[in-house]
Amino acid sequence: MRDIQSAMRQAALRSVLPLSLLLCPLAASADPARLNNPAPPPVAPVAPPPPSYDAPPPVGGYSAPPPVGGYNAPPPVAGYNAPPPMVQGRQQPVMVSQQPMLLRQPPPRPASRQGLFVGVQGGAVIPVAGDYASGLSTGFMGLGHIGWATISGISVRAELGVRSNAMSDSSVATSARSSVFYGAGLRWTGPRATLRPYAEVLVDAFSALAQTSDGTATTASAGTGVSVGGAIGAEIEVSETFSLEVAARYDHIVVNGSGTAGLGGLLGILGGGTFYF
């Protein structure tokens, strides 16, 4: 029995021997490394990275690859300003213009008032010199004026007013001396400011009315006289077109039209306002 089994094994080995001799050359030509290391599995496709901010321009004649399926670019964000381009991996600095910003400014005010103006003044008039100082008591003065101011601060003006003083002699029952005056003045006013001082010279003519009474009869005499004088004061600017005025004015009577009245000086303390057009 054992002889039969060994004989069968030898017959099987003899039948396999030609096949092994045929496969040996093929095994010898194979790479030993590939026999020991099998091939790696295939790599799954990866979505391309999003384009950079400074991506190069497309090359002419180049067909871009189709978009990767399943990849959707994010929508743009409203109100978002894209950052400046990247230069070699660094953010390009934002250049700020060095040009100065021009702001709309109101035009500068002129150094002095100029143009047409009108005004009024009124106040007390006090006899201070000559025959008026001893013969008259404190009275009233009022006037209106109109003029033209230049940019240099010099203005020419004309005035019309009235003044009245009572006699200081108490023995006379009724006595007053009044006059209507009219004339012109040349005024210099300081630069434009809230408080602007001024000075002026004046020449006036007046029609004097002297009334005297001895208790039984009243006589009146009228005539044309002349006075010269000056004033110093200030304008207080309230708005672009209106200013208040305060002034001290002196008028000296050099020619008296009434035959009975003497000569003298009157000091006026006045206030008022001026409107500029």
Image (cartoon, rainbow, N blue to C red):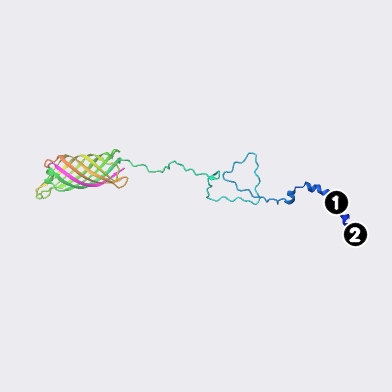
Q: Is residue 231 visible?
A: yes
| Residue 78: percent from left, percent from top | 54, 50
Asked whether 51 or 178 is in front, the reply is 51
Q: Amino acid at mark 1?
A: Leu
Examine the structure image and report whether residue 273 is included in the region drawn in magenta: yes
158 or 98: nearer the eye?
98
Say whether residue 217 is magenta: no
Q: Earlier in the sequence, mark 2 or mark 1?
A: 2
The secondary structure making up most of the magenta span is: strand
Judge left or right: residue 243 versus residue 66.
left
Residue 131 horizontal side relative to residue 108, left or right: left
Most extreme residue toward the bottom is 1
The residue pinned by badge 2 equals 3
The image quarter in which residue 11 lies? bottom right
Asked if disc 2 and disc 1 are in contact, CB closer than 8 Å, the reply is: no
Looking at the picture, tell me which residue is in the foreground, 143 or 114.
114
**Could one spot residue 220 in this view of the protein?**
no
Q: Quadrant of residue 240?
A: top left
CA–CA distance between discs 2 and 1?
21 Å
* Residue 17 image label: 1
Q: Position of residue 217 (x, y in %)?
A: 10, 47
User: Magenta residues?
Assistant: 263-277
| Residue density around tag 1, few if under 14, some if 14–19, many if 20 or more, within 10 Å | few
Is disc 1 placed on a helix, strand or loop? helix
**SS assignment at label 2:** helix
Q: Looking at the rendering, in which quadrant would you find the C terminus?
A: top left
Looking at the rendering, in which quadrant would you find the N terminus? bottom right
**Closer to the camera in the image, 76 or 223:** 76
What residue sits 83% from the left and 50% below the top? 20
